[in-house]
Amino acid sequence: MEGISLSTGSNTFDVLKNGQSNTNTPYEAQRNFASVLKDSLNKVNETQVASDNLSTKLVNGEDVELHSVMIASQKASITMQATLEVRNKVVEAYQEMMRMSI
């Protein structure tokens, strides 16, 4: 059973720990952000699909332990809630930027 990990955060800490400076061009930074976002959303989707598959197996009467189904369901729920909170913060930041006067 895998634990919940924040792999995108560890990459940031590795860069800071190694003393590498952030000398990316704006285009590279945008590409990096997009790839991190895409990877994170794919991981959330994988968690949701795994939970759904286990639930379906349990309903169909296959040999699946109930506690593993419940754990997978809670992991999927937590990752979705965290994703929604990140989305809310991004939307809030965007709205705040749009309210700024130039």
Image (spheres, rainbow, N blue to C red):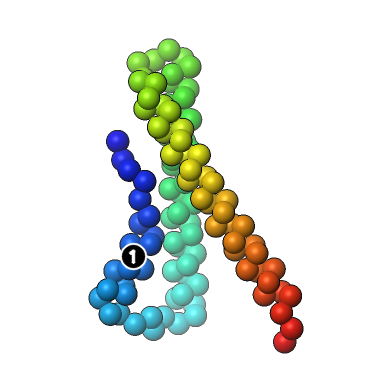
In this rendering, the count of numbered labels is 1
Q: Secondary structure at mark 1?
A: helix
Residue 29 locus on image (x, y percent): 46, 75
Up/down of 39 relative to 76, above or below: below
- The quadrant of the image that shows the C terminus is bottom right
Asked whether residue 48 is in view, the answer is yes
Which amino acid type is marked by label 1? Asn
Residue 4 in percent (x, y) is at: 36, 46
Residue 62 horizontal side relative to residue 100, left or right: left
| Furthest residue in direction left, as rendered | 18
Tell me which corner region of the image, top left, top right, bottom left or bottom right, holds residue 66: top left
Quadrant the N terminus occupies:
top left
Percent of width and height locating residue 49: 47, 36
Above or below 93: residue 58: above
| Label 1 neighbour load within 10 Å: few <14, some 14-19, many 20+ | few
Say whether residue 45 is visible: no
Q: Measuring from the top left, give residue 11's x and y in whole percent.
A: 33, 65
Q: Residue at x 59, y 63 (%)?
A: 90
Q: Residue lying furthest top in this view?
A: 61
Q: Which residue is mark 1?
A: 11
User: For the point 36% across and 27% down, which residue is it?
Assistant: 68
Q: Is residue 76 above or below residue 29?
A: above
**Viewer-nearest residue: 76 or 56:** 76
Instruction: Tell me if residue 40 comes above or below residue 49 in the rendering.
Output: below
User: Which residue shows up at 33% across the image and 62% down it?
Assistant: 10
